[in-house]
Image (cartoon, grey):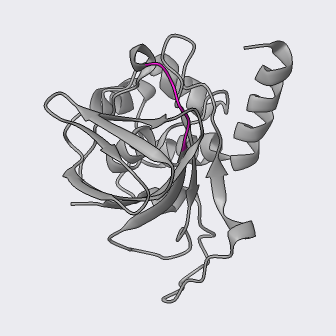
Amino acid sequence: MSPKNANKVKEEVAALNLGNKIRNLRKQRALTLQEVSNLTGLSKPLLSQIENNIAAPPIATLIKISTALGVKIAHFFRDHNMEDRIVVGKKNDRYSVNKLFHHKNESRIGYKWESLAYPMVGKQMEPFVVEIEPMEEKDLLFNDHQGEEFHFVLDGIVEFKSAEQLHHLEKGDSLYFDSSIPHALRGIGGVATSLIVIFAPK
């Protein structure tokens, strides 16, 4: 990554303020980085980079962190004075994480995701709009986490891959699966692909 792009990444991650929120909650829980590492299976260097706003966590990583800290993923995006029971999501008001590098020793995230219903407190679903970029098969990053996922392809072609199955999903196709199964996604056809991902915590 060029120095210019690296600085842009740092600015985008810092603007989200995820790192400070994660660190503050970890300290409130009286947990060390090593203890969170043990709970999540994530490395201490990666957790440190996330807390210092150097790396942006992909959805699966943020889910593991939020589960370890005993909160829903929306905790990191909402105003804690909000108690909305009805949430309207305006397209210009979404929290988003761009195609940032996960960790210097790991693969790229390969997608941009936007949280759609972050103000809702205590919800059982986490809806996202996700744009997935094309990449070489060797660069695929497999993720797994507790819960279930529903994907509905809005545009383009998405390849879903697990150890047992490979599917090409076109516009209008959908997929529902147990997200504890290691899985990876990539766009097919050279154009970024949009889809909706809904995560339902168990």
Is 126 above or below relative to 50?
A: below
Name the image quarter holding the C terminus: bottom left
Q: Position of residue 140 (x, y in %)?
A: 41, 23
Question: Relative to residue 143, is residue 52 drawn left or right?
Answer: right
**Residue found at the very far right of the displayed protein:** 4
Does 195 appear in magenta? no
Which residues fall within the magenta stretch? 132-136
Q: Residue furthest top?
A: 105
Q: Is residue 59 left or right of residue 194?
A: left
Closer to us: 130 or 156: 156
Picture coordinates of residue 51 (x, y %)? 59, 33
Residue 92 in the figure: left or right of residue 117: right
Number of callouts: 0
Magenta includes 133?
Answer: yes
Residue 197 falls in image quadrant: bottom left
Is 1 left or right of 117, judged from the image as shown?
right
Q: Position of residue 193 (x, y in %)?
A: 54, 46
**Of the pair 163 and 86, the residue shown nearer to us:** 163
Q: Residue at x 49, y 27 (%)?
A: 47
Question: Looking at the picture, does residue 117 appear above or below residue 34?
Answer: below
Magenta span dominant secondary structure: loop
Residue 53 or residue 100, whichever sits in front: 100
Outermost residue toward the left in this view: 164
**The N terminus lies in quadrant:** top right
Q: Where 8 falls versus 137 (above or below)?
A: below
Q: Position of residue 22 (x, y in %)?
A: 54, 44
Above or below: residue 197 compared with residue 140 = below
